[in-house]
Image (cartoon, helix red, strand yellow):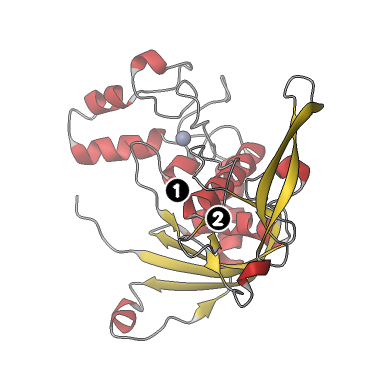
Amino acid sequence: MFEVFTNRVILCATLEMETALSVGSHLSFEPIGTDLPVMKLPDGLPFIPGSSIKGAVRALSERILRSINRRLEFWACNPLDPYETCVPASQDKKKHPWQKSVDELWREAQQNEERFSQLLAKHSCTTCRIFGSPWLASRVSFKDAYLENSQDPPMITQIRDGVGIDRDLGAAKQKVKYDFEVVVPGTCFGIEILTENLEDWELGLLLSVLRFWEEGHLPLGGKVTRGPGWGRLKDLRLKRVDQSNLLKYLTGDQPAQESADRYLQAFRDYVKSASGQRGGINHAQDPL
Ligand SMILES: [Zn+2]
């Protein structure tokens, strides 16, 4: 099957931190980035890895999809649990009757790659189709976010005292204290997200998550329960390149800025029409 350029959307915004953001010297390997969402450049300036941003945006997309509809067209698997993922690696990892493993799909496609791609897309959940899975490439890329207001670097981070929490008792552990570094409130980072060949409603889902962030309701990892990690997305700009303006774009013209409204409306319309239909994979008997 030939890959065809349908559209690319470039989303840019400024993230202004309202609370502190924890700084780590190494990356968290958890997809949700719950531990240390900020790293430092060799010159000491902090930046937010794109993987931390993606983890937070994907996790909220999953929660939104699960709250809208737990069956039919819209759903989100649990990609962290090998038994609850939409397309398990093997038959041994299946927990639900509706799941098909990747080797079963390959056999069903009779080893035809195009048919296999179609079956994978059909059996994958909405978030895996948009944000990727071990079998599907992500159609959304999150760039690392660098400082926008770096005139005064010494004031950008602070060292704070932490107190160890006993995970069983939820109480402060005696004599366990540690220091941690944070990016101070008011620090601004430049956010850039690229999407490839998303349907309008899929872009609408992504934009609905960004609306939560504009309202200050999307924490970015860190020690979230104790406050840090909250910021507000500002000045969101959306530019789209598709077949109508591709040639102009390739020869130097910048695409005009677009409103998010029509994509949010496409998402609402798609939810309404899909909720009224029966089709696709039915999880009604065995919801996640
Ligand atoms: Zn999935």
Can you give x and y, in whole percent of width and height, for residue 139 in the image? 40, 53
Seen in the picture, residue 122 relative to 36 is either above or below; the reply is above
Mark on residue 130? 1
Mark on residue 206? 2
Say which quarter of the image contains residue 141.
Answer: bottom left
Say which quarter of the image contains residue 3.
Answer: bottom left
Seen in the picture, residue 130 relative to 187 is either above or below; the reply is above
Question: On the picture, is 134 further left or further right than 184?
Answer: left
Question: On the picture, is 111 further left or further right than 84?
Answer: left
Seen in the picture, residue 187 relative to 56 is either above or below; the reply is below
The amino acid type of the residue labelled 1 equals Ile
C-alpha separation, residue under disc 2 versus residue under disc 1: 9 Å
The amino acid type of the residue labelled 2 equals Leu
Can you give x and y, in whole percent of width and height, for residue 225 in the image? 75, 40
Seen in the picture, residue 70 relative to 186 is either above or below; the reply is above
- Which residue appears at 34% of the width and 35% of the height? 120
Observer-nearest of 110 and 151: 151
Can you give x and y, in whole percent of width and height, for residue 23 in the image? 60, 51
The answer to which of marks 2 and 1 sits earlier in the sequence is 1
Quadrant placement of the C terminus: top right
Secondary structure category for the residue under label 1: helix
Can you give x and y, in whole percent of width and height, for residue 164 in the image? 73, 32
- Number of callouts in the render? 2
- Which residue appears at 48% of the width and 32% of the height? 79
Kindly tell me whether mark 2's CB lies below 8 Å from ligand 1: no
Observer-nearest of 246 and 110: 246
* Residues at circles 2 and 1 in contact by the CB criterion of under 8 Å: yes
